[in-house]
Image: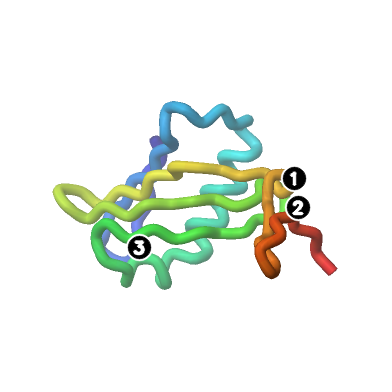
Amino acid sequence: MYRFSIGDEDWIIIFSQHLSLEQTEKEEIIRSIAIMGPQWAAFSHGESFVIFQQMVGAIVVRIEKIPSLILTVSAVVNRNRWYINDNNIVEPFEEK
């Protein structure tokens, strides 16, 4: 569990129990969430957002505002597990 403030609001970041992440990966995720802070702070309770981070991959974060201000990192998907559906053909996603 990690705590930080944005303006006069105190937020908590937690990682879902099923995630197995190295400390460096957690630090990169926290850094990305903190940088984005003013943007996600305006989202509503129950919304989610995704951050595509170079080192970690796709990070799925759920926002809870009731009863506390909590961001839950619910999934992390490594780049080698990204797929794209192009004209009903699902293939691994490759950056061009």
Whether label 2 touches label 1, CB < 8 Å = yes
Residue 75, image x, y percentages: 50, 42
Q: Quadrant of the C terminus?
A: bottom right
Q: Quadrant of residue 87?
A: bottom right
Residue 23: horizontal and vertical position, in percent? 60, 32
Residue at 59%, 31% in the rendered image: 21
Label 1: state its secondary structure.
Answer: helix
Quickly name the residue at label 2: 92
Q: Which secondary structure lies at badge 2? A: strand
Determine the secondary structure under disc 3: strand
- Closer to the N terminus: mark 2 or mark 1? 1
- C-alpha separation, residue under disc 3 versus residue under disc 2: 37 Å
Camera-side residue: 47 or 87?
Answer: 87
Residue at position x 22%, y 55% in the image: 65
Dot 1 amino acid type: Asn
Crowding around mark 2 (Cα neighbors within 10 Å: few <14, some 14 to 19, many 20+) is: few
Q: State the CA–CA distance, disc 3 to disc 1.
A: 33 Å
Q: Which residue is mark 1?
A: 80
Tag shown at residue 19: none
Q: Is residue 84 above or below residue 87?
A: above
How far is disc 2 from disc 1 in space, using C-alphas? 8 Å
**Going by the image, does 68 lie left or right of 11?**
left
Quarter-of-image position of residue 40: bottom left
What's the mark number on residue 6? Answer: 3
**Label 1 environment density (alpha carbons within 10 Å; few <14, some 14–19, many ≥20):** few
Q: Amino acid at mark 2?
A: Pro
**Colour pattern of the rendering:** rainbow
Q: Between tags 3 and 2, which lies in front? A: 2
Q: Nearer the viewer, residue 58 or 81?
A: 81
Give the quarter of the figure containing the N terminus.
top left
State yes or no: discs 3 and 1 in contact (Cβ < 8 Å): no
Residue at left offset 34%, top offset 56%? 5
